[in-house]
Amino acid sequence: MKVKNKGRKIYKTKEKNYYGKSPVGKAFSVGLTVLLIGGIGFIGYSVAEPIINYTKKKGDNDVSTIVTTDSEQVTNENGEVISGETAADDQSSSFEQYRAYALAPADLLSSDALRTALKRVPAGENIEYIEVPLKVSGGKIYYASKVNMAVMSGAVQSQVELSDMVSIIGSAGYKPTAYISTFDDNIIPINYPETAYVTADDGSMWIDNNLEDGGKPWMSPFSDMAVSYNAAIAQEAAGAGFEKVICSDFVFPEFRQSDIEYLGESVVANDRYMALTSAANMMYENVVNNGSSMMIEVSAADLLKGNSDIVQPMLLSANSFVLDIDLDEISGGVYTADTVYEFDGTASENVDKMLKLVNEDLADFNVAVRISGTSVSISELVKAKESISKYGYSSFVIG
């Protein structure tokens, strides 16, 4: 995994601190000492503390200065108490490389289909994790979910138990990762209108186009019920033994001006990202409290178009991202307000070009690169994966 300058989060029972040494952080430490000696005391510290914490959050990963007291217990990202002596070791393991192969929804329709799919894992790539699409874009669920809203809405497409998936993947020598799409969900809003975007005047459900043109509702991050539903799905996966949970589609629909007139300005307000980060943090808590860890996925094409509401390093609890380069999605070009970016080369050339364009957009996070596309062979995806190393990435997902 490419470790960027965000620094690892150390969780305490009373507050959240970030440890790391950077030149700025050292300067503040010296400055703070002088202020304390000079008698500035409490006022000086009150002003400096948020800035110091920020510089530590953005610093490197040296944790040699971790100190614990009887009243504060240091825990890892899974909520397990660790001692001061083991904190440094725990941090280094939290930045393990993530090498994964992604399955397709059809691979989860039966236990036999899953076993067959595992035989397709590319050899020689040191794949350690198998990524399982439990909830996909559109809202369909490919496991025997017990979440009531999922069952009652008809979203559940497979009756394979999560415990069986974990067991089968483990028996094949891999670790299980759950993949969960969040707000790109058109099923739940139909059955539970409280989870949808609604018009400002009469509260009727908004759809993204005319019905005859395939218009559909979207799940809204402004809905508490929608947020709780996604958090319940994530909790179910983590509680079943999935070691990692990747959450994707923290996105808003592409609203037209006519949509804004119906929905109100809140859907395009400058602070709308707070609805997404709040939802992500709720899912994060549910995941880590059940012994798993969470990553957030973002589309490379979305980053290129400036659709990056979820990328908020100061607000997110999760500090690891998956950057999805979908070769099918970008094959027709990526259109922004004033530029058309063409991706008409080989898979490797297109991956390289995209990374050159968006590489710095996730500079505050640890990043794994997903290379996907149904129109590209597995061998081409594997070859394209080699392009990521020149940008400092070692973690990847194939498929």
Image: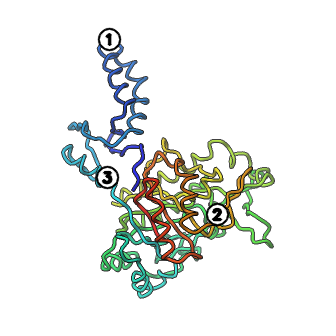
Quarter of the image holding residue 394? bottom left
Q: Which amino acid, mark 2?
A: Phe
Q: Residue at x 51, y 66 (%)?
A: 371
Whole-angstrom CA distance, mark 1 to mark 2, is: 60 Å
Badge 3 marks a residue whose secondary structure is loop
- State the residue position of label 2: 343
Whole-angstrom CA distance, mark 3 to mark 1, is: 39 Å
| In the foreground, 356 or 364 | 356
Name the front one of labels 3 and 1.
1
| In the foreground, 257 or 149 | 257
Describe residue 185's horizontal placement relative to residue 46 as left or right.
right
Name the front one of labels 2 and 3.
2
Describe residue 310's horizontal placement relative to residue 168 as left or right.
right
- State the residue position of label 3: 79
Among numbered discs 2 and 3, the one appearing first in the sequence:
3
Q: Dot 2: few (<14), some (14–19), or many (≥20) neighbours within 10 Å?
A: some
Q: Which amino acid, mark 1?
A: Gly
Q: Is residue 47 above or below residue 204?
A: above
Describe residue 241's horizontal placement relative to residue 358 as left or right.
left
Q: Is residue 259 visible?
A: yes
Describe residue 280's horizontal placement relative to residue 240 as left or right.
right
Q: Is residue 225 visible?
A: no
Residue occupying the far top of the picture: 38
- State the residue position of label 1: 38
Q: Which amino acid, mark 3?
A: Gly
Q: Is residue 146 above or below residue 9?
A: below
Among numbered discs 3 and 1, the one appearing first in the sequence:
1
Q: Position of residue 96 (x, y in %)?
A: 33, 57
Q: Position of residue 36 (x, y in %)?
A: 31, 17
